[in-house]
Image (spheres, rainbow, N blue to C red):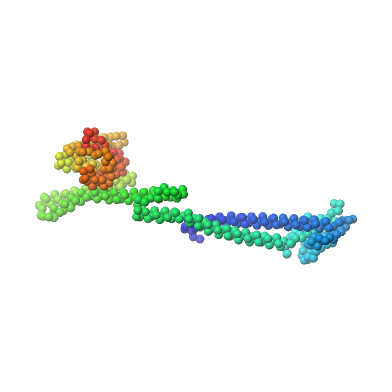
């Protein structure tokens, strides 16, 4: 047999099987008890009949005399009286029953049941001064008792079968009613996961088991929603980070196609395109490393001083073009437990922010703090209001002066947290300007 696939069918079958076993035991026990009780009743009736027959006899001089009375017909029915093995009173009975009574008369105090017509016999001794001079054999037909036991057996089996059917039906209905909320919750979770990611079951009034299931579904939907938001955020970060080098490549290609260029200008344009393509490759590689960091894989290692100098070297020309000086102060023997490209991608949005808001000076410094390395970026711009110090890290948050795409600092914080660090806004010790703090593992 194939195993039932639905829980409802399995529970119904198990309940029906258990009910069948219990009903079978009860029916068997009931019929055994009834049969034993009826057998005792037959023996009691036989003893009473034999005792009544002895009251109609007297023993004088070792001889048995049978007295007649108005009730003798009732007493003498299926009653034999013997004197020293010779019958002096016998009813009209079948030959096999007569033979059985003759044999039992020689064994007083015993019982015997014939197999031909279902009659039970019992013999009682007749004594005179302690000597057995004869016996009384009484018989009782078992037909009425057999009919009673057969009827009780059929009735109990029919009642037990009906009970089993009722148990199966009630279990099927009850299990279906109990599983209906589970099916509804499963359907709703599947629908919400496909079309409405924000819907949740919540802590509504439910049985404890369904409450646990609802909490499990909510946690599953939360993880699914977080995964979708992560993918959306990653797509936004990719588009944000790749937009600038792509725009530069498109601009260089357009300039190269507008008019004829000298070999030197052509080489410069191709070099610019190559640099921006390399930057795109570096961005993609950084995001892949960040994904590996999210998964808890190897985070790499990099000397912090050369890393800060390389980042400053890339941004110093742009800052100086705006009249902003960039200084770097970092210990030479300090390493960070982060891949260099990932650390650079964390610091780049901070320098982009400084380029937009600094007035004349930007300071990039670092120090060791226990098992962590802290990098500060200070500028002398208008600063970040305290009420916006967390908001600037929200994806899509536009800068305080309305510029920027609102993804750079959010990406920096996500990358830092993926490596076990963080990015936050602190008070500038100068009293004015912004201070961004990057914490990375040492």
Residue sticking out furthest to the right = 61
Query: What x and y, as percent, mark residue 216?
Result: 41, 49
Depth check: give the residue in front, 271 or 252.
252
Location of residue 258 with respect to 300 vertically, above or below: below
Looking at the picture, does residue 392 appear above or below residue 331? below
Q: Nearer the viewer, residue 205 or 347?
A: 205
Tell me, yes or no, if residue 377 can be seen here: no
Residue 34, how many percent across, how many down?
67, 56
Residue 147 percent location from the top left of the image: 68, 62
Based on the displayed image, in which of its 4 quarters is residue 144 positioned? bottom right
Residue under the image location 76 percent in, 57 percent down: 46
Task: Between residue 384 and residue 291, name the one nearer to us.
Answer: 384
Residue depicted at 44% across the width and 54% down the height: 181
Would you say 260 lies left or right of 157 here? left
Whether residue 181 is visible, yes or no, is: yes
Residue 91 in the image, given as x and y percentages of width and height:
80, 64
Tally of marks: 0
């Amino acid at each position: 047999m194939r195993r039932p696939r639905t829980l409802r069918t399995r529970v119904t079958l198990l309940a029906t099987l258990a009910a069948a076993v219990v009903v079978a035991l009860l029916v068997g026990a009931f019929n055994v008890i009834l049969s034993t009780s009826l057998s005792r009743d037959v023996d009691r009736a036989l003893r009473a009949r034999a005792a009544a027959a002895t009251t109609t006899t007297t023993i004088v001089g070792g001889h048995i005399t049978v007295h007649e009375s108005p009730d003798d017909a009732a007493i003498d029915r299926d009653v034999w009286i013997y004197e020293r093995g010779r019958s002096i009173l016998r009813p009209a009975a079948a030959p096999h029953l007569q033979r059985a009574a003759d044999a039992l008369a020689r064994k007083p105090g015993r019982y015997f049941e014939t197999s031909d017509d279902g009659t039970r016999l019992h013999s009682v001794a007749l004594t005179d001064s302690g000597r057995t001079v004869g016996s009384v054999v009484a018989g009782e037909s078992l037909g009425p008792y057999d009919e009673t036991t057969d009827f009780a057996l059929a009735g109990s089996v029919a009642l037990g079968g009906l009970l089993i059917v009722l148990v199966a039906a009630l279990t099927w209905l009850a299990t279906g009613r109990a599983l209906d909320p589970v099916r509804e919750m499963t359907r709703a979770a599947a629908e919400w996961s496909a079309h409405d990611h924000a819907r949740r079951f919540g802590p509504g009034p439910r049985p404890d088991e369904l409450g646990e299931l609802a909490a499990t579904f909510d946690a599953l939907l939360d993880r699914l929603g977080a995964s979708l938001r992560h993918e959306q955020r990653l797509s936004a970060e990719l588009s944000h980070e790749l937009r600038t080098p792509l725009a530069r490549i498109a601009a260089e290609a357009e300039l190269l196609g507008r008019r004829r260029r000298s070999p030197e200008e052509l080489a410069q344009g191709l070099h610019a395109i190559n640099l921006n393509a390399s930057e795109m490759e570096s961005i993609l590689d950084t995001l892949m490393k960040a994904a590996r960091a999210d998964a808890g894989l190897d985070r790499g290692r990099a000397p912090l001083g050369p890393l800060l100098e390389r980042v400053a070297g890339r941004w110093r020309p742009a800052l100086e073009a705006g009249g902003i000086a960039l200084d770097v102060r970092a210990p030479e023997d300090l390493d960070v437990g982060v891949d260099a490209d990932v650390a650079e991608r964390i610091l780049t949005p901070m320098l982009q922010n400084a380029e937009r808001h600094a007035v004349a000076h930007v300071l990039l410094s670092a120090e060791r703090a226990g098992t962590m390395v802290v990098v500060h970026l200070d500028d002398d711009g208008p600063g970040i209001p305290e009420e916006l110090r967390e908001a600037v890290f929200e994806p899509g948050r536009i800068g305080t002066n309305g510029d920027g795409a609102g993804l750079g600092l959010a990406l920096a914080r996500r990358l830092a947290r993926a490596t076990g660090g963080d990015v936050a806004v602190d008070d500038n010790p100068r009293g004015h300007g912004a201070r961004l703090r990057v914490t990375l593992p040492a």
